[in-house]
Image: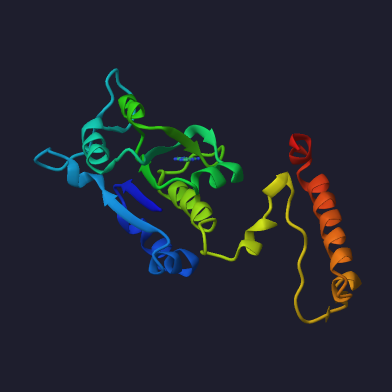
Amino acid sequence: MRIDILTLFPHMFDGFLSESIVKRAIEKGQVVINVINFRDYSTDPHKRVDDYSFGGGAGMILRPEPIFACVEQIRTTDSLVILLTPQGVPYQQSLAQDLSKEKHLIFICGHYEGFDERIRSLVDLELSIGDYVLTGGELASMVVSDSIIRLLDGVITKDSHINDSFQNQLLDYPVYTKPQDFRGMKVPEVLLSGHHEKIRAWRYQQQLKRTKERRPDLLEKR
Ligand code: ADE
């Protein structure tokens, strides 16, 4: 998979790209990520990318030209162009699964007060990562990319995400490691039993219980 991220703040991605599972996926060639500063596509002599809002109003608005020029240069017939905005479709695991099957994702990160409405005509999908307003789409694009990259073939073992929370609209079951007794808090007996069928049944019961307690809305969707 290839992911191109259009932003005015490329250094925000330095840590994201250089640590942990995302770093390893890049090194192994499972994903190619390009962070592109769309200011480079501005034809303005001062490389300005924003301007005042017609009709008045506070704040500067991103102009369409640099973003159009950039997307038109990098998009192919295999590309899906995604705009990060609080007005987008609420992001969830089922979308991560769908998007992990794409060949090429282009993320557009808005910033400042907003972007010219005509930018919307360029995009295939608008995504929101939650009902709150961030200073820009950068963190949202990292959240979405991270959740997709871990689903790509070979990035983490299949077992690691087969029981993920939200898979089948259920939260994850509790897990334990050593020590067996920590300050009087004991690992449930069944997990020490070696009885795989009983363990599987216990975990499923725990998923149901946890989801009922914490996210009954998920059970209603099932
Ligand atoms: N940009 C600003 N806030 C956002 C949000 N909640 N989701 C996606 N992009 C955003």
Q: How is the image coloured?
A: rainbow
> In this rendering, does residue 166 appear at all?
no
> In this rendering, does residue 95 appear at all?
yes
Residue 93: x and y in percent read 60, 46
Residue 10: x and y in percent read 31, 54
Q: Is residue 38 left or right of residue 24?
A: left
Residue 100: x and y in percent read 50, 49
**Residue 205 sits in quarter:** bottom right
Identify the residue at image location x=48%, y=37%: 127
Q: Is residue 132 left or right of residue 37?
A: right
Identify the residue at image location x=63%, y=58%: 161
46 and 128: which one is in front? 128
Residue 25: x and y in percent read 44, 65
Identify the residue at image location x=56%, y=65%: 156
Q: Is residue 139 left or right of residue 150?
A: left
User: Which residue in the rendered view is the most extreme toward the left?
Assistant: 45
- Depicted 160 relative to depicted 168: above or below: below
| Quadrant position of the C terminus in the picture | top right
29 and 166: which one is in front? 29
30 and 26: which one is in front? 30
**Residue 94 sits in quarter:** top right
